[in-house]
Image (cartoon, helix red, strand yellow):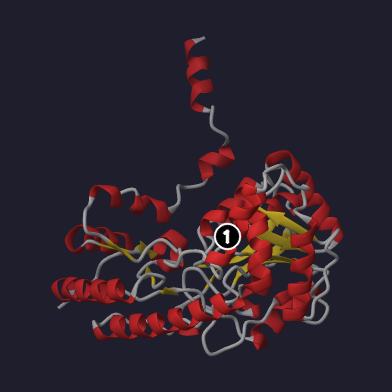
Amino acid sequence: MKQDKEEKDNNIVSQRASRISPSGIRKFFDLLGSIEGVISLGVGEPDYTTPWHIREAAIYSIENGFTMYTSNSGIPELRQELSRYIQKRYELEYDWKTELLITVGVSEALDLAMRAVIDPGDEVIMSDPCYVAYEPSVILSGGVPVKVPTSEENAFELDARDIEAKITNKTKAILMGYPSNPTGAVMPWEKLVKIADVACRHNLLMIVDEIYSHLVYGIEHTCMAALPGMKECTVLLSGFSKSYAMTGWRIGYAAANKEIIAAMTKIHQYTIMCAPTMAQIAAIEALKSGEDSVTEMVEDYNHRRLVMVKGLRNIGLSCFEPKGAFYAFPSIKSTGMKSEEFAERLLIEEKVAVVPGTAFGKCGEGYIRCCYATSLKEIEEALERMKWFVERHRKA
């Protein structure tokens, strides 16, 4: 009896939960509270405050008592504005009543998409490295993550031939996130067209995370759903966190055909109910009159991007030029250290927080992620501290 109880206690946590690891990003930030004077290039969060007119809209809604539940799918006016916005930007028409769902950030949208379309054993193809939530979201839905290695040599871009080589009779979907967190890579149109062709020929669903779609520098972002014939077989995930500096508001959305949105909405009903009412009001204002603020922030990020990349190269860390998001992904191979060792020692010795590349997959070994969504002054100071660190530890 005692042995049976011990076995039961040991199995109290589900196998799915046991298979996923704690976020490799958050691990390092648990240390920050105990170290004074740290410059953080770690958390992927704008240092801007949400523009005042967006905050004011939310405050006004609270003052007027608009604090009740909304429709599960989201406030109609928000979905209508979102439908107009997507049509204007991508020439894509989504029915606001049946093809759009407002979610608690893109994180919930990703979770809902996976649980709505993945059955146990289904395989989902994704890049390595990729955002930390992709693999766990597949595992928690009962699916099997299948990684496609990318490298600095190919600018961390997925290749259609590499994807096709991973397809089996169990493959259900391709999950992509470009502009990329962690690398800053942006997929060119010609490569996306080839991946779309692979998806169509093998009857695969495309699930695309485009949360950084506004944050591109000197190039255009291509929306997968806007490619010919791809709207019906693409689940488009995006939100307001990065481009409008609204991370804590937790507002995202999914756009897809009505069958998929209906399935996602059913799960959403039982887990979340609806996204925060005041945040939805703020999102309406962001869509109506937030573009000037976005343009201003993007211009500033671009300047910081150039300073960051140049600074990393000047201290001897190879770094391909990121074209989107707000991350640089330099190689630290010249130091002879593994990614996690480099990040830990840099934090302790120079009080600069970065994220080890291995937090994003095996192919992230030998790299670190540096976020430049912080002040130029702090970026320059962090680069100076990193220079001292690299000079001390460079391999002879």
Residue for point 58% across, 53% down: 59
Indicate whether 253 appears above or below 12. Answer: below
Q: Nearer the viewer, residue 1 or 263?
A: 263
As drawn, which residue projects farthest toward the top?
1
How far from the left and from the top, in percent, is residue 95? Answer: 86, 65
Residue for point 65% across, 79% down: 161
Q: Quadrant of residue 93?
A: bottom right
Residue 141 visible (yes or no)? yes
Label 1 element class? helix
Indicate whether 5 appears above or below 54. Answer: above
Q: Quadrant of residue 250?
A: bottom right
Is disc 1 surrounded by few (<14), some (14 to 19) or many (20+) residues within 10 Å? some
Q: Amino acid at mark 1?
A: Glu
Residue for point 62% across, 48% down: 63
Q: Is residue 174 left or right of residue 216?
A: right
Q: Nearer the viewer, residue 39 or 317?
A: 39
Count of numbered marks: 1
How far from the left and from the top, in percent, is residue 362? Answer: 44, 63
Q: Give the quarter of the figure containing the C terminus.
A: bottom left
Q: Is residue 35 left or right of residue 89?
A: left
Q: Nearer the viewer, residue 309 or 240?
A: 240
How far from the left and from the top, in percent, is residue 181? Answer: 50, 68
Q: Residue beneath label 1, please?
A: 56
